[in-house]
Image: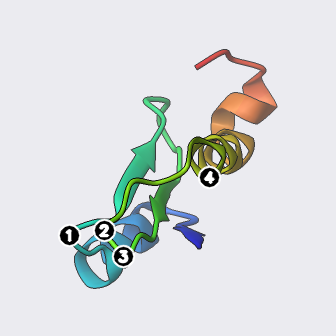
Amino acid sequence: MVIGGRNAQQNEALVKRYMDKHDLFMHSELHGAAVCILKNPSGLPVPSLSLMEAATFEMCHSPCWEAKVLA
C-alpha cells in the first residue's frame, strides 16, 4: 500500500503518524511534491515492481508531471 499527502501539513502528519521502521519514504526534490510512503509491515525486501509503481505514483502526483520536468 502506498499513501501520499496533498500538502506540507499532510506530508508531515504522514511521516510522524503512519511511517514505521520498515516503510520506504519517497519524495521528489521539486518544491511542492507530495510525500509517498510505501508500507512494508513484513520488513522483507520490497519487490522491484512495487518500488517502480510507488515511484511512478509519486512522480505522477508531483509538480514534475504538470511541469514536464524529468526527475
Q: CA distance from mark 1 to mark 3?
A: 10 Å
Say whether disc 3 or disc 4 marks the residue closer to the N-terminus: 3
Judge whether 17 appears above or below 43 on screen. below
Of the residues shown, which amino acid type is indicated by label 3?
Answer: Ser
Of the residues shown, which amino acid type is indicated by label 2?
Answer: Gly
Q: Which structural element holds mark 4?
A: helix
Residue 21 in the image, given as x and y percentages of width and height = 20, 69
Residue 57 in the image, given as x and y percentages of width and height = 69, 50
**Residue under the point 38% across and 74% down:** 14
Left or right: 62 in relation to 17: right
Mark 2 lies on residue: 43
Point out the frontmost of discs 1 and 3. 3
Mark 3 neighbour density, 10 Å: few (under 14) some (14–19) many (20 or more): few
Mark 1 lies on residue: 21
Point out the frontmost of discs 3 and 4. 3
Of the residues shown, which amino acid type is indicated by label 1?
Answer: Lys
Say whether disc 1 or disc 3 marks the residue closer to the N-terminus: 1
Q: Which structural element holds mark 3?
A: loop
Q: Nearer the viewer, residue 47 or 9?
A: 47
Say whether disc 1 or disc 4 marks the residue closer to the N-terminus: 1
Residue 53 in the image, given as x and y percentages of width and height = 69, 48
**Residue under the point 23% across and 76% down:** 16
Q: Quadrant of the C terminus?
A: top right
Say whether disc 2 or disc 1 marks the residue closer to the N-terminus: 1
Mark 4 lies on residue: 50
Disc 2 + disc 3, Cβ < 8 Å: yes
Q: Nearer the viewer, residue 29 or 54?
A: 54
**Picture quadrant where residue 24 is located:** bottom left
Q: Which label was assigned to residue 42?
A: 3
Residue 32 in the image, given as x and y percentages of width and height = 51, 44
Q: Which label was assigned to residue 37?
A: none
